[in-house]
Amino acid sequence: MTTYLPTIKQLQYLVALQEHGHFGKAAEACFVTQSTLSAGLRELESLIGVTLVERNRRVVRFTALGERIADKARRVLREAEELGDMVRAAGKPLAGELRMSVIPTIAPFLLPRILPRLRRDWPDLKLYLREETSGAACESLNHGRADCVLLALPYACGDIESDILFEDRLFLAYPGNEQPPETATADTIDEKRLLLLEDGHCLKDHVLSACNRPELRANAAMLGTSLHTLVQMVDNGLGVTMLPEMAIEANILANTGITTRPLIADHPSRSIALAWRRASPRGQKRRSSCPTARDIGADCATAQ
């Protein structure tokens, strides 16, 4: 008896529709016309004999079984991609395409140091970078849109493996017209003047965890969209904030009057790490790139 299986293309259409919730956007993501995508999904439904998607003019609604099959299809596509990765990884190490997501509180400060050495040491590597918040980066990794993520731990990123590159210490930053305390501890922070990053940035959680003062989350004076925004707020006397050492060493405080003090706490740092899917056969390739990043990370951590 002949069994007809769904094609990879049909599964890609189904997953794209689940992710975008719109036939036109899903077709655009798959680089096909909307009619081609719709026809492929109808063929899939005819093949397996069930309705996966309820269609009307306003909304795309997956059936309960459709949701389960789409989730399974995503895993199948990931494994199909890893099959190709396995073949490529058996050849020349760290060659070909590598899709890396990097969080915003790392990208502008560490990448300028890492990228020249990567280009020098791995000339056959074609690196595609995407800056994303921690949640979005981990979602990209787990859904197969990224091969690895450069992020700060601790952070719940799913079923991953990671290699810690270095520790990135936290510093309290004060306006230039203020006299900072000799010793910067969490107890010295005025919760009504603390400036934090908005939700979605893991650095905010790392700062609050390092301070171990739950009331700081509720009483933060203002929320910034980036570290550069927070620096400008502090420089204009709006409050104090916490900055990672890598940002300070990358001259984020240039042309400001801001002064800093290292945070004195039980856990005054975040761990910078390279992460990849646990099941990915390209994980060994990530490990081989870590010494370069770790060497540069050590330079960042010790430079004064």
Image (cartoon, rainbow, N blue to C red):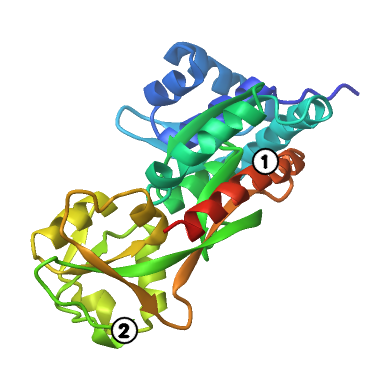
Q: Is residue 270 left or right of residue 278?
A: left
Please give the name of the residue rendered at 79% of the width and 32% of the height, measured from the top-left corner: 86
Q: Nearer the viewer, mark 1 or mark 2?
A: 2
| Quarter of the figure with residue 163 | bottom right
Please give the name of the residue rendered at 71% of the width and 51% of the height, measured from the top-left corner: 278
SS under mark 2 = loop
| Quarter of the figure with residue 58 | top left
Residue 177 picture location, percent across and down: 9, 69
Asked whether residue 46 is in view, the answer is no
Neighbour class for label 1 at 10 Å: few (<14), some, many (≥20)?
some
Q: Quadrant of the C terminus?
A: bottom left
Note whether 253 is above or below 148 in the view shown. below
Residue placed under numbered mark 2 in the picture: 183
Q: Quadrant of the N terminus?
A: top right
Which residue is more in the foreground, 73 or 144?
Answer: 144
Of all residues shown, which one is farthest toward the bottom?
Answer: 187
Residue placed under numbered mark 1 in the picture: 289
Tag 2: residue type?
Thr
Residue 176 picture location, percent across and down: 13, 65
Which residue is more in the foreground, 138 or 101?
Answer: 101
Q: Is residue 238 left or right of residue 263?
A: left
Tag 1: residue type?
Ser
Q: Number of callouts in the render?
A: 2
Residue 144 picture location, percent across and down: 60, 38
Note whether 263 is above or below 175 in the view shown. below
Residue 186 picture location, percent across and down: 32, 83
User: Disc 1 and disc 2: Cα gap in Å?
Assistant: 38 Å
Q: Between disc 1 and disc 2, whose residue precedes? A: 2
Please give the name of the residue rendered at 38% of the width and 21% of the height, measured from the top-left corner: 24
Which residue is more in the foreground, 59 or 287?
Answer: 287
